[in-house]
Image (tube, grey):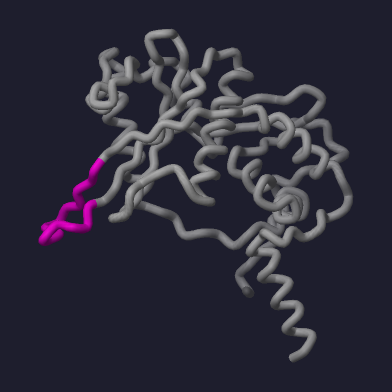
């Protein structure tokens, strides 16, 4: 991997008192594997990059435009009416700020840490009780039933719960139930004809963000430490490296 470069910027310095931005995705990385998290945020050795999902990005952008038109008008989206959700898209001056996961996002500095936990939410609705509803867009293409079961869907749930936690830490009244807007590409059409059609559905998740604070504290202790955490048997990246090292010893 001659083109791989160890990152020298955006690394945690345990001697610094400056705020260090830690995104929702990096907190998820810690949840998955503290060793990979430490190598990434302390030593600049990140996991190999995944290819960008341009279609997902396009779907997200179009959904945001669609819901924004109802946000501006103060009206309920047809999807809300279909699923009998008494809510409207939440109108707030910081909406674009909260959506910007790369540079801004919803932020919170947990007490007694110099971490700034951040996350870029897809959408927020407000119900008739005055509660904020966290909403996340997901694009897929499958003929199988879409559910929230499975290993990678568990990460979806944690994602939503981190957002719920972040908004609560910022003083907002947040509903326990959030929604995933799934946009599923149809593959059963007779021809492509230059267009891809989608089914749109809504799945609810009753979040429990009680685990988030502990995860943040544990991630903070991990970053402050001077030893690389031990390998976890559940991390496919660590297991791959171990297998390569083991193979090289006998070759």
Q: Residue at x 31, y 24 (%)?
A: 68
- Vertical comparison of 125 with 20: above or below: above
Q: Residue at x 32, y 20 (%)?
A: 85
Res 133 → quadrant: top left
Q: In the rendered structure, which segment of residues is drawn in magenta?
A: 186-199
Q: Is residue 124 above or below residue 24?
A: above
Residue 161 visible in the snapshot: yes
Q: Position of residue 69 (x, y in %)?
A: 26, 23
Quadrant hosting residue 47: bottom right
Tell me the quarter of the image containing the N terminus: bottom right
Based on the picture, tell me whether residue 115 belongs to the magenta stretch: no
In the rendered view, does 194 fall on the left or right side of 22? left
Between 23 and 17, the residue placed more toward the observer is: 23
Q: Position of residue 235 (x, y in %)?
A: 67, 60
* Principal secondary structure, stretch drawn in magenta: loop
Is residue 207 left or right of 8 when viewed as pictured?
A: left
Relative to 140, say whether 124 is above or below: above
On screen, residue 242 versus residue 72, left or right, reads: right
Which residue is at the front of the view, 7 or 65?
65
**What is the quadrant of the C terminus in the image?**
bottom right
- The image quarter in which residue 20 lies: top right
Does residue 193 show up magenta in the picture?
Answer: yes
Image point (52%, 33%), residue name: 160
Instruction: Pinpoint residue 192: horizontal percent, then vertical percent.
Output: 15, 59
Residue plotted at (77% across, 50% down):
42
Residue sticking out furthest to the bottom = 251
Residue 164, horizontal then vertical, whole percent? 55, 26
Between 190 and 149, which is closer to the camera in this rendering?
149
Q: How many marks?
A: 0
Residue 104 can be seen, yes or no? no
């Amino acid at each position: 991997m001659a083109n791989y470069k160890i990152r020298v910027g955006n690394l945690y310095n345990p001697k610094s008192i400056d705020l260090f931005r830690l995104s929702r995705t990096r907190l998820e990385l810690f949840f998955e594997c503290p060793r990979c998290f430490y190598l990434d945020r302390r030593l600049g050795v990140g996991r190999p990059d995944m290819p960008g999902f341009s279609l997902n990005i396009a779907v997200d952008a179009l959904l945001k435009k669609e819901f924004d038109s109802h946000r501006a008008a103060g009206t309920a989206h047809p999807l809300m009416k279909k699923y009998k959700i008494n809510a409207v898209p939440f109108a707030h001056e910081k909406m674009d700020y909260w959506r910007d996961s790369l540079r801004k996002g919803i932020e919170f500095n947990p007490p007694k840490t110099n971490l700034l936990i951040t996350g870029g939410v897809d959408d927020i609705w407000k119900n008739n009780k005055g509660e904020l509803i966290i909403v996340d867009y997901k694009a897929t293409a499958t003929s199988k039933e879409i559910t929230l079961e499975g290993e990678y869907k568990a990460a979806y749930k944690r994602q939503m719960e981190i957002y719920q936690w972040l908004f609560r830490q910022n003083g907002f009244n947040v509903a326990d139930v959030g929604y995933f807007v799934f946009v599923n590409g149809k593959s059963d059409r007779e021809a492509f004809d230059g267009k891809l059609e989608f089914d749109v559905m809504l799945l609810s998740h009753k979040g429990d963000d009680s685990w988030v604070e502990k995860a943040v504290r544990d991630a903070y202790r991990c970053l402050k430490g001077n030893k690389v955490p031990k390998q976890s048997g559940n991390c496919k990246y660590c297991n791959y490296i171990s297998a390569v090292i083991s193979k090289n010893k006998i070759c």
